Amino acid sequence: MRKYNKFLALVLCASMALPFTGCSSSKDNKEKESTSSESKKDDNKEKEYVKEADIYKDLDFSQYVTTGDYASIQLSKKDIDNKTDEMVQTNIERTDSYKKDKKSKIKEGDTVNIFYVGKMDGKEFEGGSCTKENTPDGHNLKIGSGDFIEGFEDGLIGKKPGKTYDVKSKFPEGYKLNPDYSGKEAIFTVTVNYILDWPELSDNFVESNFKDFDKDYKNTAKDYTQYIRDNVVKDMAWESVYTKSDIKEYPEDLLERVKTQYRTPIIYYLKQNGTNLKDYLEMQSMTEEDFEKNVETSAKSDLGKRLVFNSIAQKEGIGLDKDAYKEVLESYLKEYAVEDQEELDKLFDEYFGTKSEDIINNEILYESVNNFLTGKVKETA
């Protein structure tokens, strides 16, 4: 299992956050062909590529960011252990290795499989139902997650599988998904199919589901838990320093690069689904100005993190490790099933609007700074 790439994940999330529905018309297809033609013309233009590393090397990061104190990072042992337990349980639940409990009563924290039909004023409303006809496998809902509107999840506590219940709920004021529903009461007829009963973490479970999760740990429950804990400490240490840091200014050229890295996967995702950004924004009743504001907000959040960890790296003399670079590059070549970095760059340029070298350098430096900060952690009672 490759280590979690924070910044690539941010870019991926930007594209996955866009839901897509609907089919393209012949008009859309013509526009798509036109856009594709224009894109090919642009591709024929010679591009001058500047490495982010070359931009960073001349920056004095103290001009752009004041880093939070990291001489000694105090973290609560209880908080670390609680987050470790939560993460282990979350990862177990991602495997779908559960039994169907049809006897127990539902309690807070349980995940239940349900069908439901929602009604307002006695009539079914759009988007308020999950039935065997439209979703044969049912819907899995974690009680207490807050995924459903007020009253829905609480109304299932104490209920048993195999029965159907009427649950009173209420849409919040200012309900963004459908303003017409704001503040209105609804009754959901809910059929509870079963409670998902997850296994405990064991050596056999790790061997079957998380085998070779990291080369520095054994395939045991103890080592897997330690691996998760080590990463929790690392994340908490970074978060502690980052939240106490102050971004004074964003270098304009770097901000534009990061904005491109957010726009590109969104445009690519839409293109793969037969539409373009203009039509998508119209479907979502969003202006181009609103879209650009969202892109800039996300880009500043991402670049802010880069400025902080680069600032720490600059102060502490933390550089890029060539062996680590080769290792990460090899993992990307394998992950994307390409022969060499040139092929990888073509993919990354299309998917993310940047070259693989920039993403790899950011990943390595982020990891190196995180390891440095972890060494400053002191666990408190």
Image (cartoon, rainbow, N blue to C red):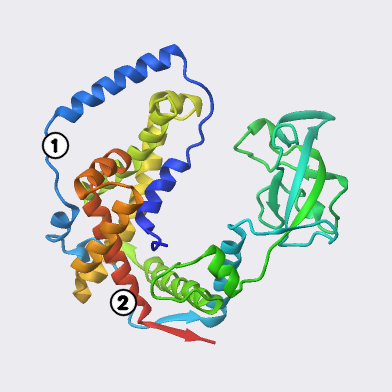
The answer to whether residue 293 is visible is yes
In the image, is residue 318 above or below residue 159? Answer: below
Left or right, 176 with reference to 141: left
Left or right, 87 with reference to 132: left
In the image, is residue 282 above or below residue 252? Answer: above
The quadrant of the picture occupied by the N terminus is bottom left
Local SS, label 1: loop
- Mark 2 burial class by Cα count in 10 Å: few <14, some 14-19, many 20+: some
**Residue in the image at 84% along x and 60% along y:** 105
Q: CA distance from mark 1 to mark 2?
A: 37 Å
Identify the residue position indicated by label 1 in the image.
47
In the image, is residue 199 above or below residue 276? Answer: below
Kind of residue indicated by mark 1: Lys
Left or right, 244 with reference to 40: right
Which disc number belongs to residue 372? 2
**Residue in the image at 47% along x and 84% along y:** 379
The answer to whether residue 321 is visible is no
The quadrant of the picture occupied by the C terminus is bottom right
